[in-house]
Image: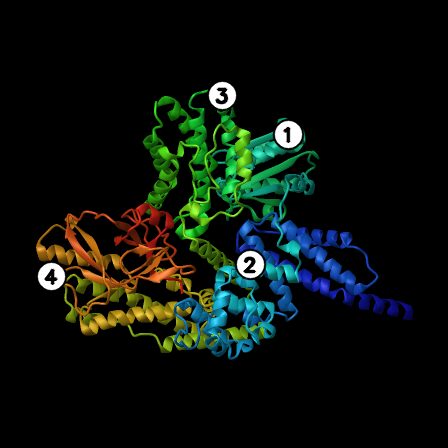
Amino acid sequence: MKEAEITQADIDMTRSLYIPVAVQGRILYFCLSDLQYIDTMYQYSLEWFVEIFNNSILATEKSGDIQERVSNINHKFMFSLFSNVCRSLFEKHKLHFAFLVCARIRMNDELIDAIEWRHLLSGPVPLTEDPNPAPEWITPRCWKEIQALDELENFQDFVKFFIRNVSQFKKIFDDQEAHMTPYPEPWQSKLDDFQKMLILKCLRPDKVTNAMQLYLAKYLGREFIEPQTAELSAIYGESSPTTPIVFILSPGTDPAAELYKFADKLKMTMKLHAISLGQGQGPRAEAMLKLSAEAGYWCFFQNCHLAPSWMPELDMLVEALTRQTNHRDFRLWLTSAPSPDFPVSILQNSSKMTIEPPRGVKANMFRAYLAQVGEMRMFLASEHPKVQQFKWLLFSLCLFHSVLLERRKFGSLGFNIAYEFTDGDLRICISQLHMFLLEYDVVPFRVLIYTAGHINYGGRITDDWDRRCVLTILKDFYKIEILSPTHKFDVEGHYAQLTDATFEDYIEYIKTFPLNDDPALFGMHPNADISFAQAETYACLNTLLALQPREVGIAAASIEEVTSQLASEMLATMPPIFNLSAIHQKYPVLYEESFNTVLIQEAIRYNGLLKVVRSTLEDLLKALKGFVVMSEYLETVSKSLYNNRIPTVWQDKGYPSLKPLGAWFLDLKDRIEFLKSWENYGIPPAFWISGFYFPQAFLTGTLQNFARKYVVSIDAIDFSFQVQTEMPKRRPPDGCIIYGLFLEGCRWDGKFLNESFPKELYTNMPPILLLPEVHHKEPEGIYVCPVYKTINRAGVLSTTGHSTNFVLPMEIPSKQPQSHWIKRGVALICALDY
């Protein structure tokens, strides 16, 4: 009996030494299960997780030292899980997952402070606003975030130090490798690597993802930031007749060709049965699945997302596979774009693999030449007199296709909407190019531009400004100058035409292309790379914020305290609603003055929003005190307040805004103040265009005033534009003066549009006079610049044919041709995102 007790004590003692493995396993599993909040296709079962865990323990080297053994198991399991999961993650989410795992492990070890972690993700608003010590390089957003650091315990007196040593921080701001630059003492030695990331986010948010990679390499290992590639053979090796293989598709991808090649390698080509799912294909697919399972064929169902109503049937069929004896060669292959209708049980118990198009012009050119251009090899090798012209035009067309695909990474600077241009678009353009080139005596550029720009690529485009952009870019690639062996597509000459080159020569030439694309190839300013990197950083932080777990116990109590204080402060400073009857009395509906109606309409809209904000905050405070039930709706509002995000219910009732909650509330108060001063002091000499809930109504009112004053049809009037040098003291006799706009993609130099300064992404635009004109004609030397409400630019297509985010086009003086600024993606923005 005594021996048994001693043995039991020994077992318990040894088991307790392995607790760190269990703790890390728990952290990893919850990181894994949280991935479904990023994308519904990221679902994994506990059985799958446990199998990887068991295999990792078996594969880990044995060691006599228990601590070393535990460390080896933890590292082996973590990397094994990471590489398995990465096969089924889209490229942009791999860094998010790795950093989430790293942060949660280090938070568990108390090496990252939870408050500092939340600060990195949500970026609270500073309690006080001090004057900016160096506005020439410190942006308003940067200065707000630096001041907010004062709220953190480890950053006491940092703001005072920053103000005294601005020049030292300017060096970090200017450094190309800002994420590796040491900070001034004592902060360099006082702060750890994570805390330094908080300062970097303020100064150079575009370098935060680089800092994350360095952090991962240091604390998890370099292998966690190396590219993770997946071979079909590896996925196939892990599969079984009862484990389906799911390809998760992204726009413009199709794994069919790769699968057919793989089937050929395994001598399964004749046994591969494919069907593209869609309406009415269910019974055929079911029969094919049953036949394949019995006979040992491969069954390939494409585009499952196009048959949502048949997905429950598929779920039952796959479940039935596990209960019956199938042929050992049978495999079920499925492809689907991310879809909420795809069965969760299949996702959890399958081998998953994401399929993404290559990134970069070089990779896209390779893909185009090996696939679409490869189909024309016979003609390219022929002696036809037009072969040389065809080669030049073909190279130019493929480069155009690659430029369009890569422009999307720049977000709204590239296109307002990220269109899904596919290989099919390029294939039909190549086919038409071949046909028209042989039909016409001279190269029919107008026909080629029309078919490619308006029909093949243009057919996907729903935004007029994007169509203008695509046609402008296309004219650089379809023009007479490209039919020359000396033509270069970029300043450096990396992309140029070849003479008498074979198909193989082109393949070798593409191998010499730069790995990283210069923004100039897309017609963009070097700042576009910074915009892209910043957008990546903020997208990553927003994703990680969405994965924050629900707090319980003491942490939940502190959240309630913060939320309650914030709600009380907001209620205390909430502007009162407008007295509509008083406004009606002071500004009656007049035929001669449409602005009276505009003011009334704006007041009604803002009243609706203020009522919702006030009632929500009052209900939330009652719920936090226990007077009413904390409903799911109020809990969502509470979480949004804590994370410094605008609650959805306010967004639905409000105007478009991308600002965090603190900045949004200040902006709301400024908007109300603008309308209050109008109500109290009469129609202002200039209007804050960003302060309007619905600026289009105000612009229509301006045109209406002019039409009624001069008795002309409103349809015959359009605006002309004059940029002012200063704010006006009195209202102009006709039209209106607006202010509060920001230029993105360039700057105003006092007379014309000019190139942006380095790292200066947005600049203030001076006031502009909008002067109505009868039968207005577009003058020379201008750029027709679209005005948008937010930097997002994309909106819902309204009945006017424009996006709901679009306000109006403005004619801004420019020395450069319009095409220069169109390719730069230049636009005027009413409100920024900070």
The residue identified by callout 1 is 264
User: Label 1 crowding class (10 Å Cα cut-off): few <14, some 14-19, many 20+?
Assistant: some
Pick whichever, 313 or 492, lies toward us. 492
Disc 2 or disc 4, which is closer to the eye?
Answer: 2
Secondary structure, mark 1, is helix
Which three-letter amino acid code belongs to the residue tagged 1? Asp
Is mark 3 in CB contact (under 8 Å) with mark 1?
no
Could you give the CA–CA distance between mark 3 and mark 1, rounded to whole angstroms?
30 Å
Residue 690, position in %: x, y? 30, 63
Q: How is the image coloured?
A: rainbow
The residue identified by callout 3 is 382
Secondary structure, mark 2, is helix
Which three-letter amino acid code belongs to the residue tagged 4? Glu
Compared with 489, 741 (above or below) is below
Q: Earlier in the sequence, mark 4 or mark 3?
A: 3
Which three-letter amino acid code belongs to the residue tagged 2? Asn
Could you give the CA–CA distance between mark 2 and mark 4, rounded to whole angstroms?
59 Å
Relative horizontal placement of residue 274, taking residue 678 as reference (left or right): right
Compared with 482, 653 (above or below) is below
Secondary structure, mark 3, is loop
Could you give the CA–CA distance between mark 2 and mark 1, rounded to whole angstroms?
41 Å
The residue identified by callout 4 is 592
Q: What is the total number of numbered labels drawn onto the structure image?
A: 4
The N terminus sits in image quarter: bottom right
The residue identified by callout 2 is 210
